[in-house]
Amino acid sequence: MNSFQLNYWVLEIIGIYLIVQAVIGVLAFEYAWYKTKRYREVNEDRDSQYQAFCRLDAKNWSRFKFYPGAVLMMPSRIVLLLIDGMILTFIVTILSFGHDFRKGPMKNGCRKYIIYFAYHVCCSFYLIICGMTTSIKKIDYDYSYYLGPNYKNNMSYLK
């Protein structure tokens, strides 16, 4: 098999994968669109009783704006999320083997730290796949209006 045949074979596999992904994405999106019909329809009687739960942005949803994401990304993301969940389950199962959770939680140590680290990595990967990021921003706020002028001196855990 020469390199041209190999490249053609790889392109065929990628093409089949993209077609299958597009079909699955469109079918999954159409199913989700059908299931969200009651959220998209305006029902004044219902919405007046449950104003806090009313979707105000549903009137702006357009079916065709969702298609590019459904066709190009959704099935691959679902597969990656399932693989991420299976890897995390495998790691936690292996590391907690031999521990009886009926007797209490796992004690601090190497196993617990590795499980914590695995959760951190897998959850970060999960957020990246979903297109989200997180950040920690520490803000020092002055609570003296509420707690008095010397509230920091009275709180030993802040020192």
Image (cartoon, helix red, strand yellow):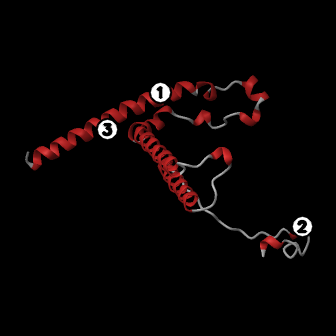
Q: Kindly identify which residue carries mark 2.
A: 147
What label sits on residue 30 in the rendered view? 1
Q: Nearer the viewer, mark 3 or mark 2?
A: 2
Residue positioned 51% across, 55% down in the render: 118
Instruction: Give the residue type that dot 3 points to.
Output: Leu
Q: Is residue 4 left or right of residue 34?
A: left
Residue at which label 3 appears = 18
Please state which amino acid type lies under the numbered disc 2: Leu
The CA span between labels 2 and 1 is 54 Å
Please name the residue shown 68% across and 68% down the image.
Answer: 138
> SS for tag 3?
helix
Q: Nearer the viewer, residue 155 or 36?
A: 155
Task: Look at the numbered discs 2 and 1 and tell me whether their residues touch, using CB distance below 8 Å.
Answer: no
On the image, the x and y values in percent for residue 42 come to 66, 26
Q: Which residue type carries mark 1?
A: Glu
Residue 89 in picture, x, y percent from top left: 50, 45
Task: Give SS at disc 1.
Answer: helix
Q: Residues within 10 Å of mark 2 (few under 14, many from 20)?
A: few
Q: Quadrant of the C terminus?
A: bottom right
Q: How many angstroms separate mark 3 from mark 1 (CA)? A: 18 Å
CA–CA distance in space, label 3 to label 2: 60 Å
